[in-house]
Structure formats: structure tokens, C-alpha cells
Amino acid sequence: MLPVLFGLALAPIAALNVRHASGRATFDQVLFHEHTVDAMIPSWPVLHLTYPDHFVAMTPGFHWVLAGVAKLTGMGDPGLRLFVLVATVAVFSVLGIMLGKRCGVVMGSVLVAPFMASVYVASSSAWMLADNAGWMWVCLLAILALWHSPTARWAVVAGAGLLLAVWTRQSYLFLAAPLWVAAWLKEAPGGPAGSNPLVAIPTRAKNLLPMAVATLPAIALLVYLYRVWGGLVPHEFQGQYDGANPSNIALQLVMLGGFSIFFLPALLGVGEDGWRRRCRGIIRRAIPWMILSGVLAAAITSFVPTTSNPKAGRAGLVWSAADKINLLGPIGDCNPLIVVVATGGGALLVLVLACTPTRQRWVLGALFAGFGIAQGASSEVWQRYHEPFALLFLALATMVAASARGLNGRSVPGVQVLPIALLALGMAVISAAMMWKNEINPWLQGKDQIPVSSLLPEPPVASQSPSDPIPPE
């Protein structure tokens, strides 16, 4: 029901082709995605990976699908936006059903609500943006790693999914990490699944082999793209994505620390029979690791830039709001408020994982670490990537914890549901306000748009650094 309401709320924006180039959604759609899809249509299904048919920084899976839909149906931009929205609603519905099977319909619906309410997810549903196509693969492959026993057939399915994920966004090779861990932790002789990963190593290596082989096509695709582009992004974008940025670590921990507070009652099973005793045991075992993780987070984030600076890649509401809220002021490029929240995020990460069974704990840890490494390799530290991932990660962890407690089919205490529902409501209000301010109201008033060229900029010559504009967060 929630995904359908979500689709109905956003359908007018897509159907009426609401666009105002001062908003990020229109800016990205018009300057990058729309042009790439339009350029692919004449030659579809034949695909060209270089300018002028390809002018996005990512792999072209999303755009190739939309170009095919446009060529086969004759749809224009509003029709394609509606197609994206319908596909997104379908994916959310499947996600809700999957979560509901593991932890009950009520909890499953509530868990997916904050993710849907994120302005970055909502705007990628109503505009022609590629983000949600990527999140679909994160969700499906994570669930495959968490809940399905690794076999040779499982490895083939997982490898195909990984290839398609990389074909959608090249950085999603990080999804190999949870899949590899899931295969490695397949039940070993003489011990339960998810026992010490350092025992029965020959057997575990044999279990891993099919998944390792199934990963090769995704790796080969990246190698091919590197040869075509001369890097991991097309030549036109190599001046923008010009190296690693460790500030991604800080933002990833901040997003987890801020959102996990709302999920903790459901993760800990507050209000269920024997919950106090269970919570005391979880916290007692986790405290030493929480302290260690918090100290490491504080040490790392104290020495990386944590003030808002869009030109340096640090763009988004969290960065700008933290600078305004911080009463102490910055210390160089360090925002003490970000460091404090990131420290809490490092500690809470351990607590979140401690609420889950051993095997799934390692898989979730690999998912979190893999995403962090992939994002850290990018020079951009954008909230639009970290916010949806944190919400999806917490939804998956809560699903695992609730399922392990046997919550499916049982009534859910309100103390677990209410905080997540309030988070979703608050995020929905923020999303609606941002889309109204940046896109809908200027469009209704017929205000002049900030010019966005209808022509793709020429690629830079080899001796020059690309000067393409950086899309606003």
C-alpha cells in the first residue's frame, strides 16, 4: 500500500513534466541523463560508450533500458519519467513483500518507509535519474547474500545480478563483498553456519570458489570500460572524479549515527518478552567493541575535512546544516559536531551489528565496509549517496534482527514502530518542502530557469582538465 501511495503522490510531477533547472533533479536530468537516453535511441540496441552518445559518469544500463522503451513505444520525456516511477513503485513493493515475509507485514512496511521518503529517492522516482536503479541492485543482492544458502546455482544468479549492478553503476562492484562473505560462511563441517570464519579454511575456500568465478564477468566489464574510457569514468568526467576522498568515511558514519537512533528499539526488540535481559546481554558483549569503534571513528574523522565545501565535493543538507548548528565554529577544515556524531555512528554500527545473528552480521559488515570503500574512492562526498544507503542498511539489519527473534506473524510493539514511522513522516515533509521550493513552485510560477545547455559540452582535449559544471547537491 505504501509504495502505491508513494507513486500516486509523485505521478503528477512526472506526468506534467515538472522541471526547473535551478533544482538538482532537473539539472541532472536535462544536462546528463536525458541527453544520454535521447542520443542512444537512434542506434538502439547497439550501444556506444563514448561521447556524444554517452555523457554520464556511470555505466549505461539505466539509460540503455530507457532508450529501448522510448524506441519501442515512442514515449517522450514525461512518459519515460512515468515509466521510471512505475518501475520504482514495483521495486519498492517487492522490497516490502520481502521484508514482510521475514519480519511481518507491519514491520516490513514501516522499514521501507524512511527509504522511500528520502528526497534523493523520491526525486529519482519522479525525474529521469538513475539512482534508484542502483539501489534496486543493492537491495536485491544484499537480500540474496543474507537469506539464501550459497550453492553453484546461487553463485550463477548472484554473478548475473552483480554484472547487471556494475552495468548500472560501476562502483557497485562493492556488492561482491557481501556475496563473497556469504559464500565463505556457508556451513562448514562440524559447525553451524556463520561460525568462526577462520576455521575450516580449505572447506570455506571451496565454498567460495563458485562465487569467485561468478564475479569475473563483472570485473571483466570494468576492465573493458577502463580500456574504452581510459579510466573508471568517461574522459569528460575525469577532472571531476579525480581521486579518493576520505571525508566519505565521516559522512557515512554521520548518516548511520543519526538514523540508527530511530531503528534501535526495533533492532533490540524493545517491548517483547524478555527484551530487557536480551538487551543487557547484547550491550554487555558489544560495549568493548563499541568503544574501540568509536575511538577509531573519532581519530579518523578528526583528521579529514568535515566542513561544507561543495567545490571540494562535500555537498548536501547535512554538511551545510552542521556548519550552521556547530556553536564552536570550525577548527581549520574540521567541524567538531561532525566528529562527535561520526564517533557515535562508529559505536552504534557495532551495536546494530550485535543485534543480528553471526552469519548475517558478517554479511552486513561486508556490505557496509564495501560501500564505504567504493564511496571513499570517489572525490564526491554527496549526501544523495550516503542517506539512502544508511536507511536501506538499517532496514536490512532490522529485518534480520526481527526475523531472528521470530517476529513474523506476531504483533509488533508500538514502541518499535513509532520511531521509524516518525522518521519517515519527518523525511517526507522535508522532501515535499524541498521539491516544492526547488522545482514545483518555480515551475508553477513560470520563473526563468537557470540556463541548461541543450548541447553536450565538448570533451576536453588531453592536455586540458575538464571544466564541466558539477551538478548541485
Image (cartoon, grey):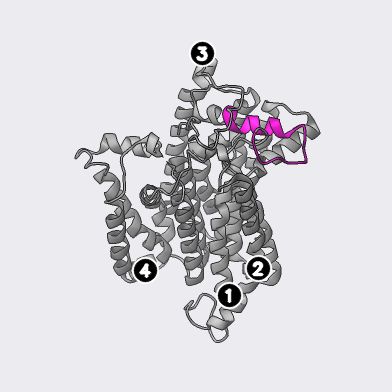
Q: Which residue in the structure is indicated by mark 2?
A: 213
Q: Tell me the residue at 46%/66% (across/down).
A: 356
Label located before the other in sequence (1 or 4): 1
* Extent of the magenta region: 29-51
Q: Are marks 4 and 3 in contact (CB under 8 Å)?
A: no
Label located before the other in sequence (1 or 3): 1
User: Helix, strand, or loop for circle 2?
Assistant: helix
How far is the residue under mark 1 from the one under mark 3? 59 Å
Q: Amino acid at mark 1?
A: Lys
User: Helix, strand, or loop for circle 3?
Assistant: loop
Q: Amino acid at mark 3?
A: Asp
Q: Which residue in the structure is indicated by mark 1?
A: 186
Q: Position of residue 142 (x, y in %)?
A: 57, 58
Q: Amino acid at mark 4?
A: Ile
Label located before the other in sequence (4 or 3): 4
How far is the residue under mark 2 from the one under mark 4? 37 Å
Q: Position of residue 374 (x, y in %)?
A: 49, 53
Q: Quadrant of residue 267?
A: bottom left
Q: Amino acid at mark 2?
A: Val
Q: Residues within 10 Å of mark 1 (few under 14, many from 20)?
A: many
Q: Residues within 10 Å of mark 4 (few under 14, many from 20)?
A: some
Q: Which residue in the structure is indicated by mark 4?
A: 282
Q: Residues within 10 Å of mark 2 (few under 14, many from 20)?
A: few
Label located before the other in sequence (3 or 2): 2
Q: Are marks 1 and 3 in contact (CB under 8 Å)?
A: no
Query: Does the magenta portion include 49?
Result: yes
Q: Nearer the viewer, residue 223 or 69?
A: 223
Q: Are marks 2 and 1 in contact (CB under 8 Å)?
A: no
Q: Which residue in the structure is indicated by mark 3?
A: 448
How far is the residue under mark 4 from the one under mark 3? 57 Å
Q: Are marks 1 and 4 in contact (CB under 8 Å)?
A: no
Q: Residues within 10 Å of mark 3 (few under 14, many from 20)?
A: few
